Image (cartoon, rainbow, N blue to C red):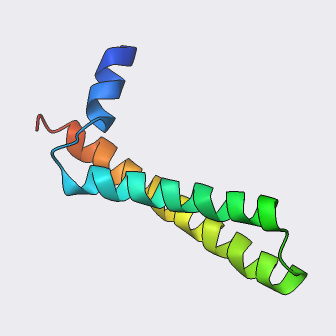
Amino acid sequence: MTSLADAFRRVWQPRKPLFWLVVGFQILSSAIVLFIQIHEPPAGLRLVLGLLALTNTLLGWWLLARLWREGGSGS
């Protein structure tokens, strides 16, 4: 079983562009949700922005899984 430090090292890879792409997607999703909460746009726009935030989050998690797998190869 891996320790918490090993798990953290598999994800924390600031020299890889994929790491920064994951961070960017998560920040963008958070910003979209914050915008929705603060400005309370009309229902149609809220739905579109919510779907965009959800898509960004899912894409970020998928990229994180790729980063996790690549981190286990000793890079």
**Quick one: which residue is furthest to the bottom in this view?**
44
**Quick one: which residue is furthest to the front in this view?**
39
**Quick one: which residue is furthest to the left in this view?**
75
Residue at screen point 39% across, 49% down: 65
**Vertical side of 43 occupied by 53: above or below:** above
Q: In this view, does 73 lie to the left or right of 3?
A: left
Residue at screen point 22% across, 36% down: 72
Q: Is residue 20 left or right of residue 32?
A: left
Q: Is residue 41 left or right of residue 58?
A: right
Residue at screen point 15% across, 39% down: 73
**Vertical side of 53 occupied by 1: above or below:** above
Image quarter of residue 58 = bottom right
Total numbered circles: 0
Q: Quadrant of the C terminus?
A: top left
**Vertical side of 64 occupied by 31: above or below:** below
Residue at screen point 60% across, 55% down: 30
Asked if residue 26 shows in the view, the reply is yes
Image quarter of residue 53 = bottom right
**Quick one: which residue is furthest to the right in this view?**
43
Where does residue 5 sit, x and y in percent of width and height? Answer: 32, 16
* 13 or 46: nearer the viewer: 46
Asked if residue 1 shows in the view, the reply is no
Image quarter of residue 21 = bottom left
Q: In which quarter of the image is the N terminus?
A: top left
Where does residue 44 sit, x and y in percent of width and height? Answer: 84, 86
Where does residue 10 sit, x and y in percent of width and height? Answer: 28, 33
* 75 or 50: nearer the viewer: 50
